């Protein structure tokens, strides 16, 4: 039986091959120039490292092209491994949805760094630009999903999952909102409400929450919607929802999606609240109220279902 890592590499390799094929077919069909975005990303990264791509003009250009292509292969393999790990952990999307999710993840992993480095700005793209970028990544996602579905791992055979009930999806969204307010709750909420959590884990979770409650009030703390902070909050919301789903042996696809969307809403909603409230009351008072709301939401999302977690550990839930 193939392992999670090997399957992920296989899925990523298949997806990358399909993505490249679709991209070059489009280039050949329309006669358009190949994208130079990977080359410019390499240049931008080199400048960030206080250096540049070495070599004469011709050699430097060849190295830029090679490094850009290698970066694309690495991204494709990495997203494939991540998708395989999520599926093995119980996040199992239906075929079409999984293809879209994997394709969107690959697209974000490619375009996100380029936008952060100032190489491109997706907000200025036209419809043709979006189609040229989205179509190959959707093909990538379809190939990844086909491999993941066709090659189950031993862990998946042991860990059967039931459909997630609506109440679990709702609780996942609520926990995501709490995570958008205070990112440490993504870990602390599930850990502190887990009857099997050890003393060290509980103390670590409490320390993380306490540190963020203090750090949030400092003037130099980055905005939660910044490029540095927002991805971690979204990932945290999804991971926390996945842990809630594991308690009852439920498929984590819908809960994780709800957790990510809830975290997105909590991040932007919390920022909007602080800006609105800061014009009416001192900012520390608005922050304390947000603390209370975030902690309350996390408790409401995590405390139910603890007995079901014990039952899930004692038996294998049928699919």
Image: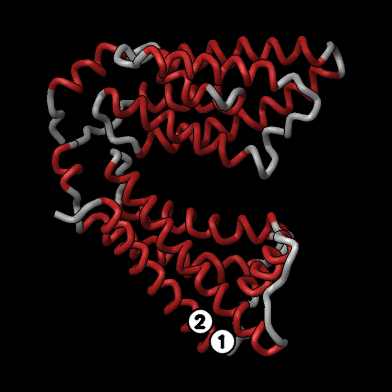
User: Would residue 57 appear left or right of 199 to someone viewing this image?
Assistant: right
Relative to 102, is 276 above or below?
A: above
Residue nearest the observer in this picture, 274 or 202? 202
Residue 211 shows in the view: yes
Q: Are marks 1 and 2 in contact (CB under 8 Å)?
A: yes
Quarter assignment of residue 45: bottom right
Residue 124 shows in the view: no
Quarter of the image for the C terminus: give it.
Answer: top left
Give percent across and percent down for residue 175.
48, 23
How packed mark 1 is, by other alpha carbons closer than 10 Å (few <14, some 14-19, many 20 or more), is few
For the point 47% across and 27% down, the residue is 173
Count of marks, rendered view:
2
Give percent across and percent down for residue 274.
75, 22
Quarter of the image for the N terminus: give it.
Answer: bottom left
Quarter assignment of residue 193: top left
> Element type at marker 2?
helix
Q: Which residue is mark 1?
A: 30
Quarter assignment of residue 246: top left
For the point 71% across and 57% down, the residue is 123
Relative to 238, is 35 above or below?
A: below
For the point 72% across and 33% down, the residue is 223
> Element type at marker 1?
helix
How packed mark 2 is, by other alpha carbons closer than 10 Å (few <14, some 14-19, many 20 or more), is some
Residue nearest the observer in this picture, 287 or 166? 287
Relative to 40, is 28 above or below?
A: below
Q: Which residue is mark 2?
A: 26
């Amino acid at each position: 039986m193939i392992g999670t890592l090997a399957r992920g590499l296989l899925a990523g390799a298949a997806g990358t091959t399909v993505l490249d094929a679709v991209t070059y077919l489009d280039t050949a069909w329309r006669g358009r120039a190949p994208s130079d975005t990977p080359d410019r990303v390499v240049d931008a990264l080199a400048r960030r490292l206080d250096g540049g791509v070495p070599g004469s003009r011709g050699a430097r250009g060849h190295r830029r092209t090679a490094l850009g292509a290698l970066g694309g292969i690495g991204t494709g393999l990495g997203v494939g491994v991540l998708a395989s790990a999520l599926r093995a952990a119980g996040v199992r999307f239906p075929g079409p949805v999984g293809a879209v999710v994997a394709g969107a993840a690959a697209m974000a992993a490619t375009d996100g760094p380029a936008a952060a480095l100032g190489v491109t700005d997706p907000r200025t793209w036209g419809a043709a630009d979006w189609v040229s970028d989205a179509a190959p990544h959707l093909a990538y996602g379809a190939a990844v999903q086909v491999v993941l579905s066709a090659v189950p791992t031993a862990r998946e055979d042991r860990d059967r999952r039931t459909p997630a009930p609506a109440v679990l999806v709702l609780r996942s969204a609520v926990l995501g909102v709490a995570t958008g307010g205070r990112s440490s709750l993504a870990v602390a909420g599930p850990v502190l409400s887990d009857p099997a959590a050890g003393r060290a884990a509980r103390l670590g979770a409490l320390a993380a929450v306490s540190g963020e409650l203090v750090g949030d009030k400092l003037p130099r703390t980055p905005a939660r919607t910044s490029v540095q902070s927002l991805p971690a909050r979204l990932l945290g919301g999804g991971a926390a929802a996945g842990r809630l789903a594991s308690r009852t042996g439920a498929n984590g696809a819908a809960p994780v999606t709800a957790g990510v969307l809830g975290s997105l809403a909590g991040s932007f909603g919390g920022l909007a609240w602080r800006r609105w409230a800061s014009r009416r009351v001192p900012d520390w008072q608005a922050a304390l109220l947000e603390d209370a709301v975030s902690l309350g939401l996390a408790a409401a999302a995590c405390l139910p279902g603890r007995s079901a977690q014990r039952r899930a550990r004692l038996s294998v839930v049928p699919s």
